[in-house]
Image (cartoon, rainbow, N blue to C red):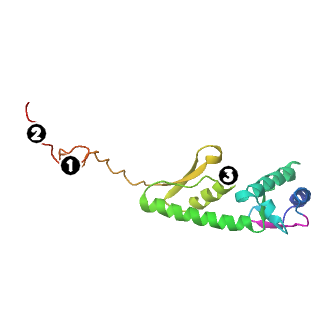
Amino acid sequence: APLSAEKQQKVEVAVAYLSDIFAKMGVEGAVITPQQQGEATVLRVEGEKAGTLIGRRGETMEALSYLASLVANRAGGDYLKLGLDVAGYRSKREGDLAALARRIAARALKTGRSQELEPMNPYERRIIHSAVSAVEGVHSESRGEGADRRVVIYPDNPAPRAPRKGRGGRPGQNRGRGGRGPRAPRTPE
């Protein structure tokens, strides 16, 4: 559906704001094209030096997206859901992360054991959670604090834990820690 005049104005505010920020970051002449993607408006950015706007694992891009959303929505009214995709990074990263989530979810289902992913930023964790929610028989949670926060994928029906074996070999075999067999009887002195 086409955007309302109010939301269209918000997009224009976001584009003007980002153009200014990009210039200050040394990225001249970047082309920003708004596109509807479901409920959200994604601002696609192309141009020389656009890689500067992505940052490590998309963190700069996410920060810019957050700021643009704040600026666009500060006037109130209907909320505009805004995203940023620099040089196709977002769509490629989303595809890669969703594939990873499906692979790890399949492993959790197969083994019946929870699977922990590497630490990720909030944007990446959201993609993982979304992909996992589409897989039957598993669910996901974020664990940890700050930069160490990561997604853990759990099977809905975990495998029963195998009973732990004693340290000295099979029970009832009268073996010591080294598993050398029965000890010689002690001779009285």
Q: Which residue is mark 1?
A: 180
- Tell me if 59 is positioned left or right of 131 in this view: right
Residue 117 placement: quadrant: bottom right
Residue 1 seen by the camera = no
Neighbor class of circle 1 (other Cα within 10 Å; few <14, some 14-19, many 20+) is few
Q: Which residue is mark 2?
A: 185
Q: Secondary structure at mark 3?
A: helix
Residue 173 in picture, x, y percent from top left: 17, 47
Q: Earlier in the sequence, mark 2 or mark 3?
A: 3
Residue 139's tag is none
The span picked out in magenta is 28-37
Q: CA distance from mark 3 to mark 1?
A: 53 Å
Please tell me whether mark 2 or mark 3 is closer to you in this view.
2
Residue 111 in picture, x, y percent from top left: 42, 60
* Quadrant of the drawing holding the C terminus: top left
Q: CA distance from mark 2 to mark 3?
A: 64 Å
Q: Which residue is mark 3?
A: 122
Q: Amino acid at mark 2?
A: Pro
